[in-house]
Image: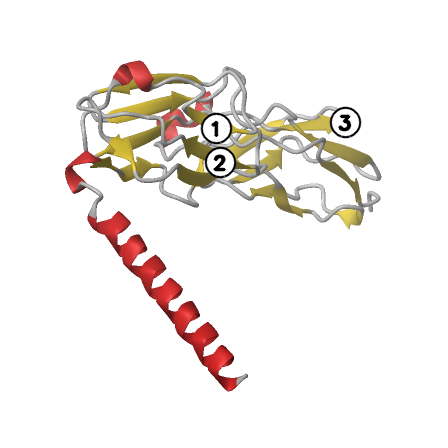
Amino acid sequence: MRRSMIWIFMLSTLLLSIGFVSAQDDVVNVDPNRIMQVVDSDPLNGQEVALNAPVTLYFDRVLDCATVNNDVIRIDQASANSVSCDANQVTIEPPSSGYAPATTYTVTVADSLRGQNGEQLFDAYELQFSTTGFLQVTEVLPTPGSVDIAGDAVITVIFSRPVVPLGTVADMEALPDPLTFTPATTGNGEWINTSIYTFTPDPAWAGATTYNVTVDPTLAAVDGATLAGASGWTFTTAFPE
């Protein structure tokens, strides 16, 4: 019985050794001159990108562009991507409607891709990126539902992302006015930085009046992020003394 166990052990060891040597031979037999790899990408793996940003992959060899198509290089969860090939790089354009906000996409490159001289990927390649999230109103003043607000109170809205680019005072007139007031009122709106907007009434707010403030639903951030839905609030001014 002991001899049988010893023979089984020796046979198992021999088979493992043969498998290890065979695996080593497979690695050694791979010709590095026939292997192609992705050396860089824009965006990088895990990076957040704008909703209309292209994806570019850079290879260490000149590609056989005849092997580049939507079946070989694609972005999962997206449709109607166009793929172009130029020397050692591939560019994938976003869908005409752009990517969905706050979504993770996966770029896959099949190992059927070939280099100009027949080189191929050692294995299929994957890259993940996330799109920008939604634009949000993070804080407003006066706070929603406030009462006894002074007639000269300044309305302040703080957004989660830059909505306007950096610029000069001369550029102010071309910037969006994101707020609508009901009942209608006049005044002066100003972006005091890229994500904070203020509004000063002129003349003052009417007394003992409830105002409804609505943020323009079409407003978009500099990076293309849009509002997730309707945004607004109310406040009530003080009674005249």
- Residue 110 x, y percent position in the rendering: 40, 30
Q: Residues within 10 Å of mark 2 (few under 14, many from 20)?
A: some
Q: Quadrant of residue 73?
A: top left
Tell me which amino acid carries mark 3. Thr
Q: Secondary structure at mark 1?
A: strand
Q: Which residue is mark 3?
A: 182
Q: In this view of the protein, which residue sits in the foreground, 12 or 48? A: 12
Q: Residues within 10 Å of mark 3 (few under 14, many from 20)?
A: few
Of the numbered discs 2 and 1, the one sitting upstream in the chain is 1
Q: Which mark is residue 199?
A: none
Tell me which amino acid carries mark 2. Thr
Q: What residue appears at the point 40 percent right and 32 percent down from the top-left corner? A: 165
Q: In this view of the protein, which residue sits in the foreground, 231 or 48? A: 48
Mark 3 vs mark 1: give the one in front. 1
Residue 89 lies left or right of residue 200; in this view the side is left
Tell me which amino acid carries mark 1. Ile
Q: Which mark is residue 75?
A: 1
Q: Residues within 10 Å of mark 1 (few under 14, many from 20)?
A: many
Residue 190 lies left or right of residue 233; in this view the side is left
Residue 85 lies left or right of residue 71; in this view the side is left
Q: Which mark is residue 106?
A: 2
Q: What residue appears at the point 28 percent right and 59 percent down from the top-left corner? A: 21
Of the numbered discs 2 and 3, the one sitting upstream in the chain is 2
Residue 194 shows in this picture: no
Cβ atoms under marks 2 and 3 closer than 8 Å:
no
Cβ atoms under marks 2 and 1 closer than 8 Å:
yes
Q: Secondary structure at mark 3?
A: strand
Direction bottom: furthest residue? 2
